[in-house]
Image: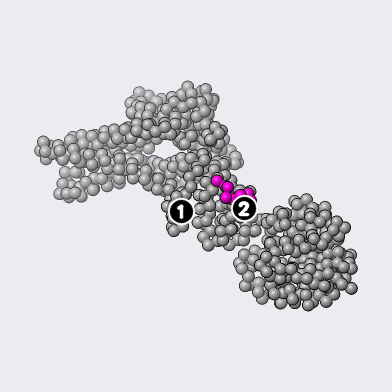
């Protein structure tokens, strides 16, 4: 028998594109709305690394079929995401997401698969068996019970059922060709076959060479389905031999016959799979006889593609070839568009109980837009979607937003935050603002306990004066230096490692500080987002939270010029106690937006 060369790469037509699948990878090439070819690729586990059952003859066909069906459905739906979808979630979708806490789109995909299976069983098994039962009842009126039970009559019934199943299948396929989107998919199906055939014939993979090939292929799923129907005739004929012994069961006879079709389906598929793979390897007159019906049926499911479709198929094929040969090639994702409302609904489901403003900030960060611009956001790109989901998962675990994003806006400056520094709070902007108002270009400013450097950066950037930033933590100083460089003020700030005033020299016009002010015993009672994510050293202010303020009261005068200012942020109900400590200062207390005494502006008096 003449043996043929067969590629280990197979494929499937998808919406406006082609998916190719090799031994170690799969790739989908799709034309986007602008006509450009976009590719999504990923690595898959080779059959050799899967459970042994995937390699056992007659059993492997069942597992490979369902695996291909699931991945094929996912790929088909994924290809549809390349195009804009302006649909907003319906009331039912919103209800599902809110009440059942499920992702409606995952549910719809599962529902589509289940519906497809149910439809296939109904059309190709239940309907033919129902018609056959009716025919048997009609025939029984004209021939004897003995004649109706003869083995060759049983075989004729099986042939009739099989022929009826084939007719239904052909009519179903013919009906789908009436729909324009399906016809285009069949054209891409033809492009897939042409590309694989071109490679198997040893030709260079070009559009010109591929277009010379036929649109039918030995290993097509359409041929597989036809073989399944032929094999089922034989298998179900054997079952039919036992029908005369089930007459006494009444209506249960038909139930058992129908159940037998479903139960025996894996056996039928296993045999059909081995036949398909074997026939695809050979080419001679004997094999062609068995191939012919399936190849003719492919005339319905494949159409002549245009050059752009073949180019798409070749792109997918070459991508798989390259990735199978070189596992270091990175995977790719479609940069698809998803409706903002649908994505927001998904994120909201993930973050039940989280403040709605957190969801706003997640999308602002992921999409690079201002909060005021969210109302005009219609779509989210794939990369933005993945970022939003990543942020939501971290927030879901209890991480505060600033830790999730890794940075925060402070006085118009982007400040990176790490576990080594306290996250700048909005109220601290009042402290920076007061320092900026008092500073001049010739001022010398000390920012003690600088942490992330946010205050020093704001002062240096807005007032343009000399700033010295100190902290007891070298790790915090490293973060502050990086932030200063990123915000373009690194040359205006000097960083000093110092425990309070220990390494500080000279006098200053302004000393500003947001020191640790939480009483030691209260730290365990703080919100999880503060307690578990802010550094302990940046929170602990001693037994009463006032240790650092005593240091300022005892030493600040020595480091301030005449008329200089000491600006301090304080905790709730600490302002009066701190003011009482500052005997050599004229103090003014500034409230924050919540009406809390938050900032002390103290001027040195002689």
Q: Is residue 455 left or right of residue 319?
A: right
Q: Which residues are magenta?
A: 369-378
Q: Residue at x 29, y 35 (%)?
A: 168
User: For residue 139, which quarter of the picture?
Assistant: top left
Q: Nearer the viewer, residue 103 or 200?
A: 103
Q: Is residue 459 left or right of residue 530?
A: right
Mark 1, secondary structure of its residue: helix
Q: Position of residue 587 (x, y in %)?
A: 80, 72
Q: Position of residue 453 (x, y in %)?
A: 76, 59
Mark 2, secondary structure of its residue: helix
Q: Position of residue 216 (x, y in %)?
A: 41, 27
Q: Residue at x 35, y 36 (%)?
A: 225
- Label 2, residues with CA under 10 Å away: few <14, some 14-19, many ≥20: some
Q: Could you say which disc has been placed on residue 94 in the image?
A: 1
Q: Residue at x 73, y 73 (%)?
A: 575
Q: Could you say which disc has been placed on residue 606 in the image?
A: none
> How many tags in the picture?
2
As for residue 164 lying within the magenta part, the answer is no
Colouring convention used in this rendered image of the protein: one colour
Q: Quadrant of the C terminus?
A: bottom right
Q: Is residue 590 left or right of residue 356?
A: right
Labels 2 and 1: the sequence-earlier one:
1
Residue at mark 2: 371
Q: Position of residue 339 (x, y in %)?
A: 52, 46
- Label 1, residues with CA under 10 Å away: few <14, some 14-19, many ≥20: some
Q: Is residue 438 visible?
A: yes
């Amino acid at each position: 028998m003449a043996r043929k060369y067969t590629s280990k790469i197979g494929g499937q037509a998808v919406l406006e594109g082609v998916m190719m699948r090799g031994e170690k990878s799969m790739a989908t090439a799709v034309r986007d709305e602008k006509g450009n070819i976009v590719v999504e690729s990923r690595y898959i586990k080779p059959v050799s690394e899967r459970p042994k059952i995937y390699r056992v003859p007659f059993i492997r066909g069942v597992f490979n079929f369902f695996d291909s069906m699931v991945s094929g459905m996912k790929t088909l739906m994924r290809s549809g995401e390349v195009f804009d979808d302006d649909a907003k979630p319906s009331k039912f979708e919103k209800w599902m997401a809110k009440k059942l806490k499920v992702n409606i789109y995952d549910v719809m995909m599962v529902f589509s698969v289940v519906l497809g299976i149910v439809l296939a069983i109904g059309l190709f098994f239940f309907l033919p068996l129902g018609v056959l039962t009716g025919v048997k009842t009609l025939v029984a009126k004209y021939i004897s019970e003995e004649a109706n039970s003869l083995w060759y009559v049983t075989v004729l019934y099986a042939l009739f059922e099989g022929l009826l199943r084939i007719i239904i299948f052909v009519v179903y396929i013919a009906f789908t060709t009436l729909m324009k989107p399906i016809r285009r998919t069949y054209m891409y199906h033809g492009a897939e076959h042409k590309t694989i055939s071109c490679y198997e014939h040893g030709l260079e993979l070009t559009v010109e060479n591929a277009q010379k090939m036929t649109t039918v292929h030995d290993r097509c799923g359409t041929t597989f389905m036809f073989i399944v129907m032929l094999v089922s005739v034989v298998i179900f004929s054997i079952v039919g031999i036992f029908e005369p012994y089930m007459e006494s069961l009444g209506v249960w006879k038909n139930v058992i016959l129908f159940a037998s079709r479903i139960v025996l389906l894996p056996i039928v598929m296993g045999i059909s799979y081995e036949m398909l793979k074997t026939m695809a390897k050979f080419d001679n007159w004997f094999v062609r006889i068995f191939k012919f019906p399936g190849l003719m049926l492919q005339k319905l499911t494949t159409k002549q593609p245009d050059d752009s479709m073949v180019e798409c198929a070749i792109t997918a094929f070459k991508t798989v070839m390259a990735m199978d040969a070189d596992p270091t090639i990175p995977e790719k994702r479609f940069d698809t568009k998803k409706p903002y409302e649908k994505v927001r609904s998904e994120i909201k489901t993930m973050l039940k109980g989280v403040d709605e403003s957190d969801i706003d900030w997640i999308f602002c960060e992921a999409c690079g837009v201002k909060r005021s611009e969210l109302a005009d956001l219609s779509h989210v790109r794939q990369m933005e979607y993945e970022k939003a989901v990543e942020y939501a998962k971290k927030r879901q675990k209890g991480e505060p937003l600033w830790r999730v994003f890794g940075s925060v806006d402070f006085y118009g400056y982007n400040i990176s935050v790490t576990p080594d520094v306290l996250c700048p709070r909005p109220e601290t902007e009042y402290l920076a603002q007061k320092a900026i108002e008092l500073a001049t270009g010739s001022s010398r400013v000390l920012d003690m306990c600088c942490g992330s450097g946010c205050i020093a950066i704001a002062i240096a950037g807005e007032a343009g004066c000399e700033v010295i930033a100190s902290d007891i933590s070298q790790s915090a100083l490293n973060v502050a230096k990086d932030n200063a460089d990123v915000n373009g003020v690194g040359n205006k700030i000097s960083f000093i490692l110092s425990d309070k005033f220990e390494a500080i020299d000279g006098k200053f016009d302004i000393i500003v500080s947001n020191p640790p002010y939480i009483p030691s015993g209260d730290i365990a009672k703080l919100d999880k987002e503060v307690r578990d994510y802010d550094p302990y050293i940046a929170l602990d202010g001693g037994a009463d939270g006032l240790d650092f303020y005593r240091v300022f009261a005892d030493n600040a005068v020595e480091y301030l010029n005449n008329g200089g200012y000491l600006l301090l942020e304080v905790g709730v109900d600490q302002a009066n106690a701190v003011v009482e400590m500052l005997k050599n200062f004229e103090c003014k207390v500034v409230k924050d937006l919540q009406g809390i005494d938050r900032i002390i502006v103290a001027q040195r008096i002689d």
